Each structure stands twice: as C-alpha cells, then as structure tokens.
C-alpha cells in the first residue's frame, strides 16, 4: 500500500491525465506551497504541484540564467519538454525570485487557458498581511469563477477546506508514528506520501493514508534498527536518492522542515464555527503556517518550530539539505547551524542540484552519522 | 577598431562634478558622525521611502546598503577582505554581492570610508527581492553577535503584484495600481511609525514628513527629466557618468540638498543639449545597457567609447530612481508628481498613500514580480533614446535585477534588436573577466558596423 504513493509520484502525469478524463475537471499546475489549494478544490479544480524531473536537461539555458537555483530550472524544463501539456491552468503564489522566472517563461512558451499571479504577502508578522491576503483571495476567487463559469460559494470553500485539512490530519497522524523508537515508516517513504498528496486528488490520497494507518503501519518495521535519528531541514526536497541512501545505512530520518515536507501540510485551517468567513480562515492559515525563510522576518519563527521538532522527535542530528543558489535558505543557514549547534545538535550542510552526487554525499553523510553514533570518541 | 575616430561634437566636463563629489562625501561623513552630534542613524535599502525616518528630525542620517556595497566593490582590495570575511562566516558566495560586501564590512569592523564600522540605530528596509529583508535581519544578528549592537529591523513588504498591466490590443502597458496592495503597504507603515516613536523616544513630525515627501517627489521627477534629455544626439551624458549621478537618489531621495543639486544638474544638462555638448565627442553610435554594472570594472564603458559608441543609459539607471509613466502610444514620460496633479498634502495617511503609490509604480521593481514588462521597457528605451544595440550584464551578484534577463534577451533578439550579453558580478571582482568581455564587445561592435 505504501508503494502506491511512490507510484503516484513516479507517474504523476498519467495520474493527472487520468483524473481529467474521469472527472472532466480542470487541472491547475502550481509553483510554491503558498498557493491556496482549498480554493482550488472549492472550484473543483485539481491542484498539482510542479516539481522537477531530476534528469539532466539542456532546454532551459536560453530562458533562465544558470545562476538561478536548479529546482526552478528543472521545473521549467518539465514545462518546456511538454511533460505538463495537460494543464488547464498555471499559477504561482509569490514567494522566492527564482521560481517566478519559471512561471514567467512557462507562461510565455507553454501558455495555458488560465494563469494567475497571486501576491502572497511577505510581511506575515504584520497584522496588515491578513486583510491584504483576504482581499487578494477575493480577486483570485473571482478570476476562477470567470474561468470555470460558476460561483464559488462559502459552502464550496468549506468543502475545499475540509478536503485539504483532512489530508493534513492524516499526514500528521503518520508523522506522529515517527516519534516512536522504531518508526514504522522511513523518511523516504514519508516523503513519498507527502509529495504524492501534492500531485493527486487529496480525497483519494487521504483515504490511502487512512488505510495505511489502519492496516499497514501498525507494527511495520519493528525489527528495523532505526539507528541515528535525523531531521532534514531545507528548501524544496524530493531528492529521494539521497534519503534512501542515508536510510540504507544506520540512520532514520524521523522528521523534516522543508516545503515538500511538514511546511507544506503541518498547519490546518481554523474554521471553528459556521460564522467564520472561510476565505479569511484560509488566509489566516497561510499567514500563520510555518513560513518559508523568504517570509520569515523580522523575527525568526521557523527556527523555533525546527527546535520543537528536534525535541519532539528525539533528533540527534540535522542535515541541512537545500537547493544550490537558494537565497532565502542560504541567508538562514549560518544562524540555523549556530542555533542548532548551540543546543548540542550537530549539523551537516549539503547542496542539491538537479541530480545529486550520491557518492560524495554518501561519504559525508556516513561520516556524519558515525560522529553521532560514536559519541565523542570515534576510535 | 579604428584608432582615428574624429571628434564630431564639442565636449566638456560637467560643471557640477565637484559638487557631486562633495555631496557624496558629506553624506557618508554625516552618517559616520551622527552620534557625535546627538543624531540618529539608520541603514536600509535604496528602494525606500526615506521621508519616514526624516520625519523624526533633521539630524537623522541614512546609510543605504546598495550604494555602500557598490562603493566597496569599487575598492577591490577592500572588497576582497569583505568577501573573505563573509565566506569565512559561512555565507555562500552566490548570495547578493552588495549584501556580502555589507556583512563583510561589519565582520571586519571597517567602514568603507575609513574608521571602524558604524552601526545604525535601526534598520529601515523595503522588501521586494528575496534578499531584502534577510539582509538586514542578518545584519542585525551580526551586529548583535560581534558588537552587542543588534539594531531593530523594520521591513515593509512591497510584494503586492504588478503595477503596470498590458493592454493586449495595443501591446502597450498602462498603470493599474492595486488599491488593496497600497492599503496593505500603508498599514505596515503606520505600524512601523508607532514602533519607531517608541524606539527613538521622539515624535513623528508630520510637517517634516510632508517636507521630506515633497523633496522625494521633486528629486525623482528631476532625475527623470534629466534622463529624458539623454535622448538628444549627441548624448549629453554617458552611462558611466550617469552612474555617478543617479546614486544620490539611491542615497536619500528625501534630501533637500539633493533637490538643489538635481535642479542644477538639470539646468546644466539642458544647457549641454542646447549647445550640442556631447559626453563622447566621437559619438557615431549609441547603445543602452542593462542591470547594475560590474562596479570594479567601469573602464568597460570607456572601452566602448573607443568605437565611437556611447552608452546612453538603461532601464536600470533611468528607472531605478526615476518616476515614469507610459503614454498610450508607449512613449515613456515622467509620472506627474502629486504637486503637478494639484494635490495638496493634508494628512499623514494621504501622504503615505501617495508615497506608496509612487514606490510601487517604480518601473524597474516590477521585473522582480513578472518579467514581460521589462522586456517591453527595454524596447521602448532602445527606440526612444535612438540606440543601435543593447548590452546586458548577466549579473551574478543580483538575482533580483537579473531576473528574466535570458528571456528579455530572446525577446529583443526576436524583435531584430542587436543584443549581447556578458556575465559578471556587480560586487565580486572574482566573477568578471575583463579580457573576455572586451572580446565580446569587439565582436558586437563589429556586428554593428563599428570597427
């Protein structure tokens, strides 16, 4: 059953095309986890997050200067190579600079029926951001209504919230199990679960997760030595080869903070009563969720949540694995490492590219795990 | 290239050059000595609404980060020390070069203009690119760590979406301010003003604010008019000179001293146009460039001149500190200031709203949100300023301004506009190859029929 999530990830395009055929619905490709999927579900649109293909390519060079992050170039490559030609819409929630170019170039060369730039605020610690975002959501909702030819009601929005939140709750239950001394699911397997939710219908995904929780996960991997408990902190991360390599040794990734992990799903919409305006509730969720470093200022909130995870999950070491050239995360790295190391948590920093140098990474991660498992004395 | 280009036009140095140098030196001196006079100093980005800190008194002095980073870049040995310090501290070298220079200066405790690094009392920043807020968040942390001087950080988010939209029928862009976005920015500023009053123990004075705001609009309007004069043939100014002049608005747009300077400069440039005084006496071709230059290698602009080619400016040098609007036929023109529109400033909220509208309407900053507008602007400048070609600096030191450069190059090439790109770094001398770039320029000039 767990294999199903990997299948969705590896066959994401077939999944989406099949969904379109079976439902007659529209598919919206999106960049960045600040896109409010709740509103898309309310509009009966399937949101699919655009991720890279992790294969070398040569199509982006004329369109995107090589100094921008590998992730944004890999995402654009998928568009230019026609992998996502089934998309009906394309949108971005404004976050980092790099991925904005992918959106822009994609729109230029692979235009879709509908496209949208959602100005997601950056001053999330300002009270002004909530009303601003709600105002932008109202415009976005109107644009969607014009596209799909019907009104999106408050009941639709509540339905959208329910769909997405249920999936979040299921994933949090899975993550809860990873606190155990013998986690029943590896970091790589959990990541397949999370990423699969970003490219499939969450109603179906939540059911699969629920079935896993009931039938497969109890007692799973109980004889596996979890070894050293690690956390991965970073930017976009669907670099499975790295995780599987790490967990093939004597370590388990028990938790994470990155935007293909907990940052994507951890925080739920607070829709307490029938009177709460659903658009405001959705806006509040995106304002208050664990922020991307791009929006984590002037105080650093994200680091506090990382430290909480370190404590809750019994983490011994943190692998800071982020995209090369990623400015927001690079600006954070020095402070993050110092904060963790001051708390006695050792760190290892790795940089991702489109394809990862697994050999050199293995040497470094093996040595890192050894320092954590040997204590102060290696010899 | 020909070694015997004949002078076609008269030329003479700028009369206000000495004053420009004095003003710039005074600016950095005032900042460094602010505390000795009981004043306040702040640091933040050049894309700013300076009238707000100016409202706390006439003894409030800024240090804007980008010109400071560029000044460091110009001094290559000093820059090298800053880079080394930043990298030793763990900051990756692909980060914004200005930012690394700035942090490096803090880490080695040296002010680029002499003496120890001068810590500000607060940071006052406006966030457009991904580094803007992080720059001063991290500067505050560095200050706290190395000198127990972690100044509070006030950042205002400007990420409210595009200001100019495209008319699909005409292909031209038009102003379409996001009122929800303007209110969002204004609300943030109200919050900050309240906190600054508590921090500084001084009231925010509306009279000073309105005066500084008028200076702000006048400064950027004057600069826009100066840029327009460079449409003249021969061009009265060249881009290397323009870089030395536009910087005042990157230092402090609220300065009354700078208003006087810009009035003087406008008169002088108009006079040069009237008398046919050229920046380059051998002008036989004109190009425009784009994005910040490699500050440590401005001789590149003199190299171009050996071909009789003058660089007349760019969307960057015109747009960064100008105030522009677009006619229905695509002609770039100055955006009318509130005074020119007959608006009388009556209260703080109104003044803030007008200032926010101005900063959001800045033509270069939209590129950080979506990149089609700049491609359009580049084409407009190319035509309106009578250019033969465009040179684009693929600047590794600034991801914000280099956004979309590759697509913009393709757009221009498809329009039949001769365009050449070269790689470099505005603030890190290690990432620029002068010889290779000169070879590219040689080939480009030959393609323009200039040898």
Image (spheres, grey):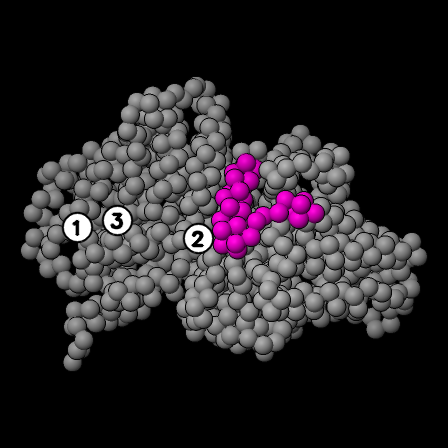
- Residue lying at 87% horizontally and 69% vertically, measured from the top left: B5
Discs 1, 2 touching: Cβ within 8 Å: no
Q: Which residue is mark 1?
A: A178
Q: Is residue B348 visible?
A: yes
Asked which secondary structure carries label 2, the reply is: loop
State which chain disc 2 sits on.
Answer: A
Residue B432 seen from this side: no
Question: Residue A158: x, y in percent?
Answer: 32, 25
Foreground mark, 2 or 3, reads 2
**Residue in the foreground of this view, choosing between B2 and A238:** A238
Q: Quadrant of residue B91?
A: bottom left
Per the image, the residue denoted by label 2 is A298
Give the percent coordinates (x, y) of residue A368. Answer: 24, 69
Same-chain status of marks 1 and 2: yes
Q: Quadrant of the C terminus of chain A?
A: bottom left
Residue positioned most to the top: A150
**Of helix, strand and loop, which one carries label 1?**
loop
Please give left or right for residue B217 compared with residue A225 in the image.
Answer: right
Which region is colored magenta?
B182-211
| Precedes in sequence: disc 3 or disc 1 | 1
Which chain does tag 1 point to? A
How far apart are the alpha carbons under marks 3 and 1?
12 Å
Q: Which of the two marks, 1 or 2, is nearer to us in this view?
A: 2
Dividing the picture into quadrants, the one containing residue A227 is: bottom left
* Residue B202 magenta: yes
């Amino acid at each position: 059953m767990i294999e199903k999530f990997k299948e969705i990830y590896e066959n994401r395009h077939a999944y989406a095309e099949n969904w379109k055929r079976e439902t007659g619905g529209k598919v919206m490709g999106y960049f960045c986890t600040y896109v409010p999927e709740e509103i898309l579900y309310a509009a009966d649109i399937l949101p699919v997050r655009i991720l890279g293909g992790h294969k070398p390519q040569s199509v982006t060079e004329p369109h995107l200067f090589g100094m921008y992050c590998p992730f944004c170039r890999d995402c654009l490559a998928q568009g230019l190579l026609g992998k996502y030609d089934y998309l009906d819409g394309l949108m971005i929630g404004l976050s980092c600079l790099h991925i904005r170019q992918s959106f822009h170039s994609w729109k230029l060369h692979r235009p879709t029926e509908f496209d949208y730039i959602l100005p997601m605020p950056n001053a999330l610690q300002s009270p002004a951001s909530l009303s601003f975002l709600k105002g932008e959501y109202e415009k976005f909702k109107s644009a969607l209504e014009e596209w799909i030819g019907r009104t999106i009601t408050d009941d639709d929005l509540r339905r959208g919230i329910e769909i997405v939140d249920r999936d979040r709750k299921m994933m949090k239950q899975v993550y809860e199990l990873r606190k155990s001394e013998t986690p029943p699911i590896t970091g790589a397997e959990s990541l397949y679960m999370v990423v699969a939710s970003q490219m499939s219908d969450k109603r179906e995904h939540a059911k699969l997760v629920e079935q896993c929780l009931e039938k497969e996960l109890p007692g799973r991997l109980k004889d596996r030595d979890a070894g050293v408990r690690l956390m991965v902190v970073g930017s976009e991360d669907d670099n499975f080869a790295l995780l599987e390599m790490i967990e093939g040794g004597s370590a388990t990734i028990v938790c994470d903070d990155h935007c293909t992990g907990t940052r994507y799903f951890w925080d739920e919409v607070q829709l307490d009563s029938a009177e709460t305006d659903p658009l405001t509730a959705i806006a509040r969720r995106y304002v208050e969720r664990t922020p991307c470093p791009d929006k984590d200022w002037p105080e650093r909130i994200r680091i506090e949540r990382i430290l909480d995870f370190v404590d809750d999950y019994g983490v011994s070491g943190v692998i800071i694995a982020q995209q090369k050239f990623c400015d927001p995360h690079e600006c954070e790295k020095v402070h993050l490492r110092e904060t963790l190391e001051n708390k006695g948590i050792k760190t290892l920093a790795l940089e991702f590219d489109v394809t990862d140098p697994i050999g050199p990474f293995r040497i470094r991660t093996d040595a890192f795990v050894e320092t954590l498992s040997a204590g102060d004395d290696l010899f | 290239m020909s070694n015997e280009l004949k002078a076609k036009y008269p030329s003479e140095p700028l009369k206000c050059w000495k004053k420009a140098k004095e003003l710039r030196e005074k600016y950095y001196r005032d900042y460094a000595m602010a505390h000795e006079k009981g004043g306040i100093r702040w640091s933040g980005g050049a894309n700013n609404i300076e009238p707000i800190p100016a409202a706390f008194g006439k003894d409030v002095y800024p240090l804007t980060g980008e010109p400071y980073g560029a000044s460091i870049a110009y001094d290559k040995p000093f820059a090298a020390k800053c880079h080394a310090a930043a990298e030793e501290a763990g900051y990756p070298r692909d980060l914004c070069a200005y930012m690394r220079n700035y942090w490096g200066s803090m880490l080695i405790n040296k002010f680029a203009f002499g003496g120890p690094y001068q810590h500000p009392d607060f940071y006052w920043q406006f966030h457009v690119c991904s580094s803007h807020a992080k720059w001063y968040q991290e500067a505050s942390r560095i200050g706290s760590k190395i000198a127990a001087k972690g100044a509070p950080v006030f950042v205002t988010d400007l990420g409210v979406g595009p200001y100019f939209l495209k008319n699909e029928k005409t292909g031209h862009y038009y102003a379409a301010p996001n009122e929800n976005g303007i209110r969002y920015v204004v609300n943030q500023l109200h919050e900050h003003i309240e906190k600054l009053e508590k921090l500084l123990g001084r009231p925010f004075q509306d009279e000073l604010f309105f005066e500084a705001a008028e200076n702000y609009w006048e400064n950027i309007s004057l600069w826009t008019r100066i840029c327009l004069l460079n449409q003249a043939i021969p061009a009265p100014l060249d881009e290397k000179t323009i870089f030395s002049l536009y910087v005042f608005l990157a230092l402090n747009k609220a300065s009354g001293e700078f208003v006087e300077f810009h009035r003087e400069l406008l008169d002088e440039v108009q006079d040069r146009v009237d008398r046919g005084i050229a920046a380059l006496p051998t002008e036989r071709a004109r190009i425009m460039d784009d994005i910040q230059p490699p500050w440590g290698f401005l001789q590149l602009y003199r190299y171009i001149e050996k071909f009789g080619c003058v660089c007349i400016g760019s969307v960057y040098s015109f747009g960064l500190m100008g105030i522009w609007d677009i006619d229905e036929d695509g002609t770039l023109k100055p955006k009318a200031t509130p005074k020119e529109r007959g608006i009388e400033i009556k209260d703080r909220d109104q003044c803030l709203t007008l200032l926010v509208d101005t900063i959001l309407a800045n033509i270069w900053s939209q590129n950080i949100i979506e990149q089609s507008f700049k491609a359009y602007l580049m084409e407009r400048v190319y035509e309106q300023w009578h250019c033969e070609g465009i040179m684009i600096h693929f600047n590794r030191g600034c991801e914000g301004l280099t956004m979309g450069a590759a697509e913009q190059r393709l757009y221009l090439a498809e329009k039949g506009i001769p365009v050449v790109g070269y790689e470099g770094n505005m603030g890190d001398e290690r990432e620029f190859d002068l010889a290779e770039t000169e070879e590219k320029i040689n080939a480009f000039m030959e393609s323009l029929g200039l040898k």
